[in-house]
C-alpha cells in the first residue's frame, strides 16, 4: 500500500494531492517543506536533542498528539516528517470537508493494514478544532484502542476546541512562531537551494529586503516564502537579480516604517513609550507600542520593559500591575503573533492608567547604598538562626519575639543592624494602594519608636 493512500477510495488526502503536483509549478513554500527532522527550522523546545517528541519519532513510538500553533509554524510539515521517518502509513483528512463516513473508511483501512502488515496508520486531521462533537466521538474509540494514531493540527486552543475525552488520549505540543533568525535561515535556504528553491534563478537578497520580510512575516515561514516568491517573480519580470526593500513592501503589502532597532529611532521610541506609561497617557502608550510592533520590534523586549515598569513606576501603588504585565508575557508566549498584540495592548493601557509610585526603586537604591557604604554589618543576635545548643548559648535567637504571639500579629522590634537602626529605605507614596500602606506603616513605625 503506497504511503498516503489506502487503495480503498480514501477521501481527500492533502498530502497525496500535494505530492502529485508538478514540482516546477508548486508554490515555493510547498517545494521547500522540510523532509527530515534535521531540515525543520525552529521548534527546538519540542524537536531538539533528547526531547520527548524527537525521541518518539526516531524510535517509531509516536503517540496520538495535537500540534497547536499559529499558521506557518510547521504543523503540517511536522506530520509529513513523522510519516517519512516512521514506518507508519499516513492518511490526511481535512476537518472542513470530512465527515463521520470518512473516519469510518479510514479506520477500516487502518484495521486491515495493522492486521495484514503489522503497520500503524497515522491519521492527520488538519483544523481538528472544526470537528464537531459527533465527529470527535466517532474517532475516540479508535484512538483509544490504537487502531489509528491521531495527529491533529489546530490554530485554536485545544483545551476549548477538542473534547476532554479525546484530548486526554493525546499529547499536546505547542508550536511557536519562528524567531527572526530562524526566518532568515528559511528564506536564505530557499534562495540557495538549486533543486527546490530559487538557486538557479540567480536571485540575490539585499539586507533591506531580508530585514523587511523577516520583520513583517509574524513568525510565519509560509508567509515569508510566499513573499520571497512574489518578489523574485517581480524582479525577474524586470530582468533584475537583486531583491530590494521595495520588492518586499510590494510582496507583503506593508510599508517600511523608519525604525532602526540599534539606532536613535529605537531608543527614542521606547523612551516615548515608557514616558507615556509613566505620564498616565494610554493613548500615547498604545500609539508607540503599535508603532514599534509594526516596525518589527521584538515583542518580548516590549513585554520585558512593561514588567520592569510595573515595579519601577507603579509598584505597590497598584500591586496588580506586576501581575498584569507578567500575565501578558505568559499570554504572548502562549498565543504568539498576531493575537499576542491583544494582551500587550491590555497591559499597556492598564499600566498607563495605574496610580504611580517609584518608592520600590527608591527603596532599593537607598538599601544598596547602605550595603555598599557600610559593608555586611552583623545581623542582630536575636535574628540569627540557632540550630545547635552552642549557638543558643552564645545568644543566637535569644530575645526574639514571635509577632504572631502578640495582638495584631505585631510587636515593636528593631530588625536592622545596630548601625542602621532608624534608617528608612521604603517610603510609600500617597498614590493608590500605597496611601493605605503608608498609613499602616506610619502607625507601626510610631508604635515601634515609642511615639
Image (cartoon, helix red, strand yellow):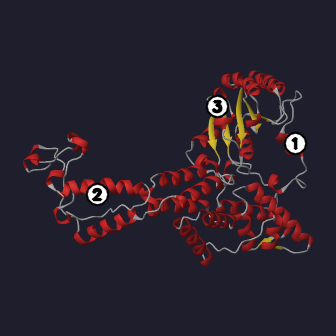
Picture quadrant where residue 122 is located:
top right
Q: Which residue is mark 1?
A: 17
Q: Nearer the viewer, mark 1 or mark 3?
A: 3
- Asked if one can make out residue 426 in the rendered structure from this viewpoint, the answer is yes
> Looking at the image, do the residues carrying marks 2 and 1 touch, with CB atoms under 8 Å apart?
no
- In the image, residue 363 sits, relative to residue 342, either above or below, namely below
Q: Quadrant of the N terminus?
A: top right
Q: Secondary structure at mark 3?
A: helix
- Between 85 and 9, the one nearer to me in the picture: 9
- In the image, residue 102 sits, relative to residue 338, either above or below, namely above
Picture quadrant where residue 97 is located:
top right
Q: Which mark is residue 167?
A: 3
- Between 155 and 172, the one nearer to me in the picture: 155
Q: Which residue is mark 2?
A: 442
| Residue at the image position 49 percent from the left and 54 percent from the top | 321
Q: Residues within 10 Å of mark 1 (few under 14, many from 20)?
A: few
User: Alpha carbon of mark 1 to alpha carbon of mark 3: how far?
Assistant: 29 Å
Amino acid at each position: 500500500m503506497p504511503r498516503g493512500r489506502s487503495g480503498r477510495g480514501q477521501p481527500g488526502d492533502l498530502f497525496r494531492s500535494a505530492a502529485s503536483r508538478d514540482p516546477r509549478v508548486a508554490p515555493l513554500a510547498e517545494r521547500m517543506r522540510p523532509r527530515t527532522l534535521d531540515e525543520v527550522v525552529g521548534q527546538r523546545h519540542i524537536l531538539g536533542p533528547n526531547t520527548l517528541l524527537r525521541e518518539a519519532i526516531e524510535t517509531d513510538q509516536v503517540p496520538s498528539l495535537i500540534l497547536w500553533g499559529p499558521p506557518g509554524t510547521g504543523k503540517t510539515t511536522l506530520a509529513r516528517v513523522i510519516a517519512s521517518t516512521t514506518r507508519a502509513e499516513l492518511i490526511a483528512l481535512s476537518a472542513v470537508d470530512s465527515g463521520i463516513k470518512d473516519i469510518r473508511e479510514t479506520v477500516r483501512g487502518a484495521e486491515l493494514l495493522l492486521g495484514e502488515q503489522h503497520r500503524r496508520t497515522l491519521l492527520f486531521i488538519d483544523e481538528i478544532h472544526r470537528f464537531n462533537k459527533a465527529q470527535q466521538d466517532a474517532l475516540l474509540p479508535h484512538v483509544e484502542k490504537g487502531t489509528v494514531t491521531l495527529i491533529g493540527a489546530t490554530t485554536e486552543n485545544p483545551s476549548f476546541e477538542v473534547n476532554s475525552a479525546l484530548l486526554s488520549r493525546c499529547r499536546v505540543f505547542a508550536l511557536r512562531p519562528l524567531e527572526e533568525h530562524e526566518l532568515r535561515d528559511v528564506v536564505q535556504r530557499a534562495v540557495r537551494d538549486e533543486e527546490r528553491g530559487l538557486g538557479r534563478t540567480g536571485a540575490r537578497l539585499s539586507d533591506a529586503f531580508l530585514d523587511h520580510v523577516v520583520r513583517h512575516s509574524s513568525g510565519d515561514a509560509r508567509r515569508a516564502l510566499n513573499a520571497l516568491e512574489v518578489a523574485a517573480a517581480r524582479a525577474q519580470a524586470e530582468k533584475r537579480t537583486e531583491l530590494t526593500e521595495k520588492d518586499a513592501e510590494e510582496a507583503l503589502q506593508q510599508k517600511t516604517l523608519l525604525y532602526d532597532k540599534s539606532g536613535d529611532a529605537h531608543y527614542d521610541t521606547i523612551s516615548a513609550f515608557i514616558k507615556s506609561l509613566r505620564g498616565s497617557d494610554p493613548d500615547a502608550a498604545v500609539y508607540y507600542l503599535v508603532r514599534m510592533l509594526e516596525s518589527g520590534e521584538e515583542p518580548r523586549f516590549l513585554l520585558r520593559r512593561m514588567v520592569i515598569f510595573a515595579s519601577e513606576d507603579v509598584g505597590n501603588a497598584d500591586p496588580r500591575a506586576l501581575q498584569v504585565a507578567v500575565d501578558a508575557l505568559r499570554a504572548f508566549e502562549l498565543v504568539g503573533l498576531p493575537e499576542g498584540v491583544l494582551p500587550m495592548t491590555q497591559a499597556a493601557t492598564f499600566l498607563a492608567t495605574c496610580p504611580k509610585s517609584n518608592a520600590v526603586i527608591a527603596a532599593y537604591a537607598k538599601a544598596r547604598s547602605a550595603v555598599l557604604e557600610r559593608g555586611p554589618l552583623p545581623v542582630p543576635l536575636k535574628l540569627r538562626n540557632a540550630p545547635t545548643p552552642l549557638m543558643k548559648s552564645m545568644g543566637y535567637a535569644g530575645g526574639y519575639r514571635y509577632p504572631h504571639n502578640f495582638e495584631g500579629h505585631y510587636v515593636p522590634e528593631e530588625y536592622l543592624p545596630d548601625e542602621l537602626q532608624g534608617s528608612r529605605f521604603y517610603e510609600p507614596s500617597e498614590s493608590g494602594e500605597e496611601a493605605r500602606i503608608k498609613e499602616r506603616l506610619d502607625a507601626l513605625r510610631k508604635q515601634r519608636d515609642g511615639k
